[in-house]
Each structure stands twice: as structure tokens, then as C-alpha cells.
Image: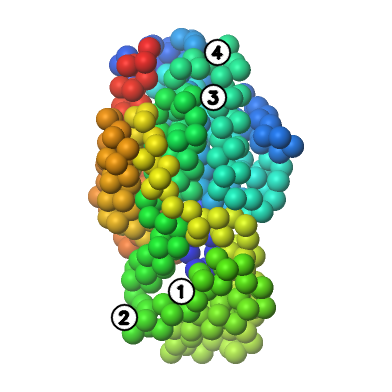
Amino acid sequence: MNESWHLPLEIKIVFLALFTVAGLGLSVWGETEEEVSIWNGGIKLAGTLTRPRAGKPFAAVVLVPGSGPVNRDEEVFGWKPFRVLADHLTRCGLAVLRFDSRGAGGSGGTAYRYELQDVAADVLAAVRYLKSRADIDPRRIGLCGHSQGGIVAPLCGAQSDDISFVICLSGTGLPGDRVFIAQQRAISRAEGVTEREWREDLGDLRKFVGLIRGRAARADLEPVVRAMVSRQIERQTRGTDSPGEKRSSELESKVDCILSGYDTPWFRSFLDYDPGPNLAKVKCPALLVFGELDAQVPPEENRQAMVQALLRGKNSDFTVKTFPGANHLFQAAVTGSPSEYERLGKEFVPGFLDFISSWISERVRQRN
């Protein structure tokens, strides 16, 4: 996930193609880019479809973004991972559809005022849109989801036979409440929080999760959030001469931001959701990709849970890959903490793009 206690962070180019991955067909005439509108009931989703100029009908990939109001490039601190990924896949002979999430860019709706199932419905609407196009092969449409998208992609795969493959980048296999606690622990460790300080936070975190799941009033949530943020600010400013007025302003701002992001239908649905049963229903080829240093979706326990679910469902074609030294955004990282994202290089770790495109190439070639 792209959430930290500070805020849900998400989490948050068209070049000429000279050749493509073997088996997908040659695309010597470059690429086209088209602005599209996708409708899910009364919600309009604004997106971009990129495709090669030659070789249709094309196999296609829908990029499913992380949580929060995220634009179609999944932009965070100037890094545009979905733009880079879409360009790479298109140069490899694939059509790629990416769209602004609800409440972002040109899309309708309101950020966080929806549930995970609503996000899945948006993605399935995108798949239906692609199926309606003569230049897209309806038998070869897959999903590539990051973070929240790595939760939603298998949910869609369990609900629709129209999905030919599922890729989960930093997806989860544990129930949401467990992921949230594990995430906060991993971020705290990366930020140098001591075991004693973590134990101070853990009780309030568990209380907070229980209150959110119980649909508690904001007035009951606020004292718990305020206590935790106060401790966090105290640790960060310890030994400094930070003015009390500045600390107070920072406290109020952070408390308001946290409650705005977490006291929402979206976060409640995330905490309540157990991805295991739907992962077990995914029968199409699946790819699970993790970053070794990911502090937002701790890889080891989520990888194990996802693999076990796919095995329970007797999925006969799934692949698991962990990139050493990579964070949640698959950048080369130092600690994996979200606090360092802005300082890191605006590029994927070596081998990431080629690995993804090669895996897709093999699957869509089998269905050609």
C-alpha cells in the first residue's frame, strides 16, 4: 500500500519504437497516444491509451494505480512510474491504458469516498472499453496493478473471465488490518524508531484500527491520532530549538490530514478486506513482484500469503520475483522508507522493465 501514518502516499514520452520483444511483432512506425473517456455508471474516468502504429489487433494492459487521488502517471515527487512503464510496454508491441483515479486529474468522483470494490468496478469498465475497440484483441487483455492496484487486479481476475493475466506490483496477501500494522512497523524501523518507542505506538495503532473498523465517530478517533502524532513530532524535534508554535501548527495539520485520509469508506474497506479468497479464484497467469526494501508492503509475509492463496486455488501458472534493494516504487533505495522517495533517482531498478515485458510477452504469445 501507499499509506504511511503521515498520509496515504501514493501512491501517488512517446518515443519511436525500433523493435519489440520477440513474438509480439515488429513495430517500426512508432506509437500513437489517444485521450479516452471510460464510464462506470455515472463516474467518468479520464485516461490515455498508447499503442503501436502497426500490428493490430493488439494485446493490451490496463495499469491499475495505487490508493488515493493518483493521476494516470501515478506521479509522486516528480517520478512518473506509470508513464515510463506504459511507454516501455508500448514499445514492446502492447496497447496500454492508464487512467486518473477517482478525484484526480480529469476523472470524476471524490478521493477516498469509495470502496475497493468500486475501484475494481472502474478497472472492469476499462476492460470493457478495450474490448469494444476493433484495434484491441479481446482475448489478450491483462491487468498490471501497483500497491492498491496489486490488491484490485486479483479481485478483478476473480470476478471476470475477460482478464488474460494479472500482475501484482507490491500487492498484498494479508488482511488489510494486518498489512497496516506491519507497514507502520516497517516504516518505524526504517526511520530509526526504537523498540520501546514502537511499543508506545502499537497500542494506539491497534486502538485506531479497531475504532475505524467499528465506524467510530471522528471525535473518538481524534484523541488517539493526536497522541501518536504528538509523540512523533516530539521524537523528530528532540534536541532542536523548534518553536512551540511551529510544533502546534504541524500537529494540527497532520491530525487533520490523517483523519481526512483514514476516516473514509476507502480505508475502512481496505482494513476489512482479506485478499486471500479472491487470489485463490484467480486462474489466469499471475505475476507477483516485490521490492526487497518495501516498507509500505513488507514483502516476505505478503509474498508467502499470496503464494499460498494461489496454490490453494490450484493456479497452474504464477511467477514470483523480488528485486533486491528496491522500495515500494521499485526505485533503488537505501532504507525503503517513504521519507526518502523524493531524494531517489527517478527510474526503476535495473532489469525491472525488461522482466515485466518479457513475462507479458510469453503469456500473450501463448494466446495469439
Vertical side of 327 occupied by 263: above or below = below
Question: Do residues under tags 1 and 2 come within 8 Å of each other at their CB atoms?
Answer: no
Residue at figure coordinates x 32%, y 38% from the top left: 313
The numbered disc on residue 135 is 4
Nearer mark to the viewer, of 1 and 4 = 1
Dot 2 alpha-carbon crowd within 10 angstroms: few under 14, some 14 to 19, many 20 or more: few
Question: Is the residue marked by circle 4 packed among few (<14), some (14-19), or many (20+) residues within 10 Å?
Answer: some
Q: Which of marks 2 and 3 is nearer the N terminus?
A: 3
- Disc 2 element: helix
The quadrant of the picture occupied by the N terminus is bottom left
**Label 3 crowding class (10 Å Cα cut-off): few <14, some 14-19, many 20+?**
many
The amino acid sitting under disc 3 is Thr
Relative image position of residue 73 (x, y in whole percent): 54, 40
Quadrant of the image containing the C terminus? top left
Q: Mark 2 points at which residue?
A: 195
Residue type for callout 4: Asp
